[in-house]
Image: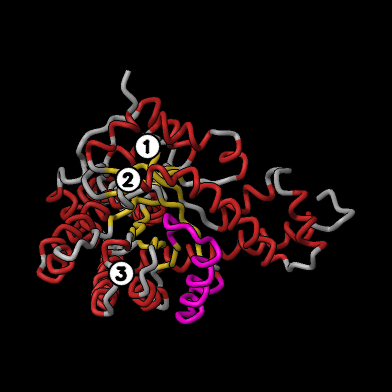
Amino acid sequence: MSNPLVDLGPLGQSVWYDSISRSLIESGDLARLISEDGLRGMTSNPAIFEKAISGSKDYTDDLRRHAAAGLTPLQIYEALAIGDIQAAADVLRPVFDASKGADGYVSLEVSPYLADDTQGTIDEALRLAADVDRPNLMIKVPGTPAGVPAIEALIGKGLNINVTLLFSQDNYAAVAEAYISGLEALAAAGGDVHRVASVASFFVSRIDVLVDSILAEKLQGETDAARRAAIEDLLGKVAIANAKLAYQYFKQLCAGDRWQSLASKGARVQRLLWASTGVKNPDYSDVLYVEQLIGPDTVNTVPVATFAAFRDHGVAAATLELDVADAQRVMASLGNAGVSMKDVTDKLQADAVRLFVEPFDKLLAAIESQSAPSGHG
């Protein structure tokens, strides 16, 4: 019986795990996911660490030890996160070595408090990369207006970067440009462009959640049958259409002269990574955002429940370049229905930054209470 997760590899897609915890690593589960399910990498974020640290007793002794040593909650978080990231990177190191640096990465995010601070992001990324000290670390930097110049600078210094929180085509184009410019700067300074890897994390399900809610409101006031049908036709289709068009842009870039010149020096493409691929709407297939976005030079970072669902009943087939004309039609029809994709993606990015700040605040508060010597919180 073939494993659909393993079957993604020959189709050019790497499957990563959108989760990290000490127990996952120490129990041997991570090693098993790699050997049995073809897992090729991992991503983390403040919300994932908040769940791991608040939701288990695994960290209690370390929390108290660090607190007794006088570390602040932020320093304690970093010590715990860096320990987990190093351990995961070591388990994934054989994947990194066997793929010659194409896969086997673990991602660690810069502080969400720095989303609007270019220099702060650069400084923190360099510091975290030095502290983790693993060749298969990717530093996660949001593709916010302040993040994009930081990404270019960090690529220029030879760091591996996972660009996160991308929702719009324009934002992705700016990030792809930052990657190319950063590699050009690295090459000009005599650096080895082949040693740099990057992914552009393009978010999926959150787009449908917001767009579907806007369309549902429009349906409530719409009496014209033809217009109702046109709106209903868009439900659950916009996120995948948006991702498919981003991939078409990626292919155009790879064919361009600037990229070809870097490729001749051994540069790796900045793969599109599909993020937020858990399905939020129970009316849709629970593997929708994996099955519909399979193609070469891509990554899907899959949440725990979706990973198990795809292993159980997913179908691995090359789908990413099917129906591209229909994807264009969907995006055009969305505009005709009076929905501004720019408003949608701007709101989603602003919300996403906030959705990382909130669990980070909560995480630091939990660390503070759990590390109190008498506390059993």
Q: Position of residue 207 (x, y in %)?
A: 37, 55
Residue at 28 percent of width and 55 percent of height? 271
Residue at 21 percent of width and 46 percent of height? 296
Name above or below for residue 33 compared with residue 257. above
Q: Residue flagged by tag 1: what amino acid is it?
A: Tyr
The residue nearer to you, when weighing 68 against 272, is: 68
Q: Which residues are magenta?
A: 113-138
Residue at 29 percent of width and 65 percent of height? 172
Q: Is residue 105 left or right of residue 177?
A: right
Name the mark on residue 236: 2
Check disc 1 and report the residue beneath it: 284
128 is within the stretch colored magenta? yes
Q: Residue flagged by tag 2: what amino acid is it?
A: Gly
Mark 1 to mark 3: distance in Å? Answer: 31 Å
Mark 1 to mark 2: distance in Å? Answer: 8 Å
Q: Position of residue 209 (x, y in %)?
A: 41, 51
Assess disc 1: are there few (<14), some (14-19) or many (≥20) residues with their C-alpha within 10 Å of its C-alpha. few
| Residues at marks 1 and 3 touching, judged by CB atoms closer than 8 Å | no
Q: Residue flagged by tag 3: what amino acid is it?
A: Val
The residue nearer to you, when weighing 170 against 209, is: 170
Check disc 3 and report the residue beneath it: 175
